[in-house]
Image (cartoon, helix red, strand yellow):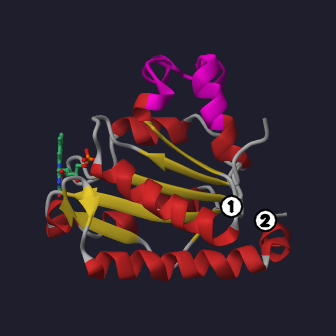
Amino acid sequence: MSNPAIVGFSGNLTNPSKTRAFVDLIVQDIANRHGLSSRTYDIDDVGPSLGAAKWARDLDARAQAILSDVLAADVLVVGSPTYKGSYTGLFKHFFDLIDPTALKGKPVLLTATGGGERHALIVEHQLRPLFGFFEAFALPTAVYATDKDFTDGVLRSELIQKRAAQAVDEIAVLLANKSGVRMAAE
Ligand SMILES: Cc1cc2nc3c(=O)[nH]c(=O)nc-3n(C[C@H](O)[C@H](O)[C@H](O)COP(=O)(O)O)c2cc1C
């Protein structure tokens, strides 16, 4: 089976998860809009081999398959709940296992959730530098939502929905110029 074109990866540790639901909402939106295949994963999906892995080759088959989908994606949508002012440790550990050149030029939409507004800049001060390290094509619009933007785990805030739509519009520009993005990555 071929790798999905739009891949979501969420750093949540517990389920149900607002972050996973938020990432998946954006993934579905992009996939439906462009008629592309999609999958969303979280730390639970990667499973227990992640914590003990020092290298990608230490991951079990299920985790390696997820890693392969992340690397092959045309567009990556990442998200993490804010834990102690940053992304979760296992979210970072998953990306620590990736070769520094493997995400070069990949369009990445950055999202995060948190308990309140105080850590809204996690998307700019934590996630953006991480994907800057990889020389990924992080979109200008990053989206942060708080617990109060969700009702029963579903995003209800019109303001956040509007901001997410703005990021999805930026993806549309990139997908329309896909060969240009690939060239920039080479
Ligand atoms: C261990 C832990 C640490 C947290 N630290 C923060 C924090 O520093 N700032 C914040 O705004 N929210 C913090 N939160 C709240 C979560 O980020 C917030 O509830 C998030 O939306 C949960 O997402 P989830 O439903 O995907 O797990 C923390 C929660 C936990 C469990």
Mark 1 burial class by Cα count in 10 Å: few <14, some 14-19, many 20+: many
* Quarter of the picture holding the C terminus: bottom right
Q: Which residue is mark 2?
A: 185
Pick the front one: 158 or 94:
158
Q: Position of residue 104 (x, y in %)?
A: 71, 58
Q: Position of residue 54 (x, y in %)?
A: 54, 22
Asked if residue 137 can be seen in this view, the reply is no
Residue type highlighted by circle 2: Ala
Q: Earlier in the sequence, mark 2 or mark 1?
A: 1
Q: Secondary structure at mark 2?
A: helix
Q: Nearer the viewer, mark 2 or mark 1?
A: 1
Left or right of residue 100: residue 22: left
Q: Position of residue 171 (x, y in %)?
A: 62, 74
Q: Position of residue 136 (x, y in %)?
A: 63, 62
- Residue 12 is marked as none
Q: Which residue is mark 1?
A: 106
Q: Which residues are magenta?
A: 45-67
* Quarter of the picture holding the N terminus: top right
Residue type highlighted by circle 1: Lys
Left or right of residue 22: residue 165: right
Q: Is mark 1 within 8 Å of ligand 1?
A: no
Relative height, residue 44 to residue 6 (above, below):
above
Residue at image location 49% in from the left, 18% down from the top: 49
Check if residue 62 falls in the magenta segment: yes
Q: Give the Cα separation between the discs numbered 2 and 1.
A: 8 Å
Asked if residue 167 can be seen in this view, the reply is yes
Asked whether disc 2 touches disc 1, contact meaning CB atoms under 8 Å apart, the reply is yes
Check if residue 92 falls in the magenta segment: no
Residue at image location 72% in from the left, 73% down from the top: 175
Relative height, residue 174 to residue 112 (above, below):
below
Q: Secondary structure at mark 1?
A: loop
| Main secondary structure found in the magenta portion | helix
